[in-house]
Amino acid sequence: MSQSASDDLTEVHEGPIGEPAIRTITLPLDTNPEGDIFGGWLMSQMDLAAGNIAARYTRGRCATVAVDGISFRCPVKVGDEVSVWADLLGVGTTSMRFKVSAWRRPRDCEHMTKVAEAVFVFVALGPDGRPRPVRAGALAALRSA
Ligand SMILES: CC(C)(COP(=O)(O)OP(=O)(O)OC[C@H]1O[C@@H](n2cnc3c(N)ncnc32)[C@H](O)[C@@H]1OP(=O)(O)O)[C@@H](O)C(=O)NCCC(=O)NCCS
């Protein structure tokens, strides 16, 4: 009898290093008419993940201003665990660029597969809703903390 993926406890975790910004489980209400997970749902998770990191790094309100080069590499199924990593690529005067990648793990095995990636651009906002400067030095200190 062949060994199933869930029995193979030696299978390695192949996701990015460190903690994800978001980790969640997909549900039937997140599906498209074909029964796979809706791409818009996955995009919203990626936006939430990068926004969470942006607000943490800048200690305040941030808004998504652009999403570049999003690609969906393979379908996500109901019941999958989805983890999203957001890594700071660069900082401007008021903006930050994040490389965001989403990974699926079927609930009965340890193997993670990258399902989507994109670059998200966030702008730090002041109380007036206008861009506010971000301090690259402070971001670097937070990243390494
Ligand atoms: C974010 C917002 C306040 C920026 O206003 P703005 O008048 O474009 O401000 P600026 O032109 O000064 O640009 C601010 C920064 O964003 C960057 N930026 C603006 N548009 C961009 C784009 N399309 N792609 C990449 N960067 C962009 C600018 O280069 C600048 O970066 P820097 O300060 O690091 O050099 C405004 O665009 C806004 O409110 N957008 C809606 C945000 C939102 O609701 N997001 C959720 C969408 S569902």
Image: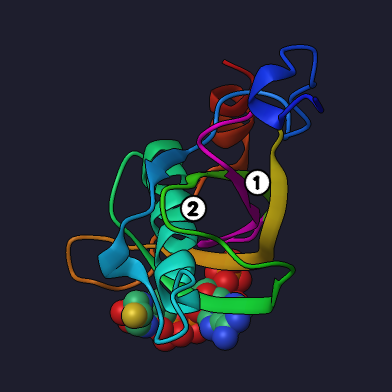
Please tell me whether residue 141 is drawn above or below residue 39 in the rendered image.
Answer: above
Question: What amino acid type is highlighted by mark number 2?
Answer: Ala
Residue 144 locus on image (x, y percent): 64, 20
Question: What amino acid type is highlighted by mark number 1?
Answer: Leu
The answer to which of 38 and 7 lies nearer the viewer is 7
Image point (64%, 25%), residue name: 6
Query: How would you rate the neighbour count of disc 2 (Cα within 10 Å): few for under 14, some for 14-19, many for 20 or more?
Result: many
Per the rendered image, the range of residues in magenta is 91-109
**Mark pair 1, 2: CA separation:** 9 Å
Query: How would you rate the neighbour count of disc 1 (Cα within 10 Å): few for under 14, some for 14-19, many for 20 or more?
Result: many
Image point (51%, 59%), residue name: 77
Q: Which residue is identified by label 1?
A: 88
Q: Which residue is identified by label 2?
A: 50
Magenta span dominant secondary structure: strand
Q: Hey, which residue is sitting farthest bottom in the picture?
A: 33
Q: Is residue 110 visible?
A: no
Residue 140, labelled with which disc? none
Q: Is residue 71 visible?
A: yes
Secondary structure beneath label 2: helix
The answer to which of 76 and 138 lies nearer the viewer is 76
Corner quadrant of residue 32 = bottom left
Image point (74%, 68%), residue name: 73
Corner quadrant of residue 15 = top right
Total count of labels: 2
Image point (72%, 47%), residue name: 113
**Does the magenta-highlighted stretch encompass residue 94?**
yes
- Closest to the camera, between mark 1 and mark 2, is 2
